[in-house]
Image: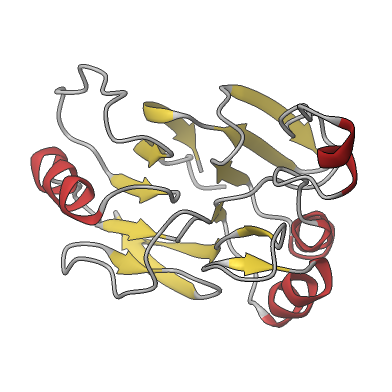
Amino acid sequence: MENPLLLRVVTLCDVDHRISDITASPVDFVFCLGDLEDVWMANRVEALNPRYGAYGIRGNHDVNAPFPSNIEDLNFMNKAVVVDGRRVRLAGVPGSWRYKPYGRWLFYQDEVSEMTDAMEAADILISHNCPANIGHERPCESLAEDTFSVHQGFLGINDYISAKKPQFLFHGHQHLHKTTQIQETVVIGCYGETLHEIPL
């Protein structure tokens, strides 16, 4: 059996000013998890200079536009990257639940379920939103929000975890740092800029 890769991953999400002092090299991947201003995001990726690239999905406050040239789009997509001779499979799920009639990167539960069902298996899944009902959803601020919560998780991500068994899932949107094991998947809630070291 191969020895696991130890990957240094930086996640960026939800705000443009929560910056840590991540300066140690090398960084293997940068994952942009949504709700970030494009120029800031591109500059941060350039400064971090990840060895195997930067990959992003859009959040519910993002523009509907191509990513900057140094960030690869993973919105409902798959990508395989060769790391030290081994194939690392990536996939991405953008957006949040459709809590209002109009807006960018907003989806009903069945839309996400349909898209994730069509996606290939991945070793690492990145998403803006979290899976549903795992204790990562931000508490509602009012009774009205309880029914139509901006922060309800996606059931389609739960189904993806059950069917395709990624080793890791990094998500934003909920403004928390929290790690939960769901079946065979380590689910990591991220906020701001965070460095992770993961065995793969």
Q: As drawn, is 151 to the left or to the right of 76?
A: right
Q: At x 16% / y 22%, what residue is drawn?
A: 24
Q: How is the image coloured?
A: secondary structure
The residue lying toward the viewer, choosing from 12 and 103, is 103
Q: Is residue 117 above or below residue 103?
A: below
Outermost residue, top direction? 21
Q: At x 51% / y 32%, what residue is drawn?
A: 190
Q: Is residue 39 above or below residue 113?
A: above
Instruction: Return the x and y of residue 153 as percentages of the image width and height.
Output: 76, 48
Q: At x 79% / y 30%, what residue is drawn?
A: 140
The residue lying toward the viewer, choosing from 65 and 27, is 65
Question: Number of labelled discs?
Answer: 0
Q: Is residue 186 above or below residue 85?
A: above
The residue lying toward the viewer, choosing from 76 and 1, is 76
Instruction: Return the x and y of residue 119 as percentages of the image width and height.
Output: 65, 77
Q: Quadrant of residue 196?
A: top left
The residue lying toward the viewer, choosing from 85 and 104, is 104
Q: Quadrant of residue 19?
A: top left
Q: Quadrant of residue 7?
A: top left
Instruction: Return the x and y of residue 78 as percentages of the image width and height.
Output: 50, 74
Q: As drawn, is 114 to the left or to the right of 120?
A: right
Q: At x 39% / y 38%, what residue is drawn?
A: 11
Instruction: Return the x and y of residue 47 as percentages of the image width and height.
Output: 9, 39
Q: As drawn, is 74 to the left or to the right of 135?
A: left
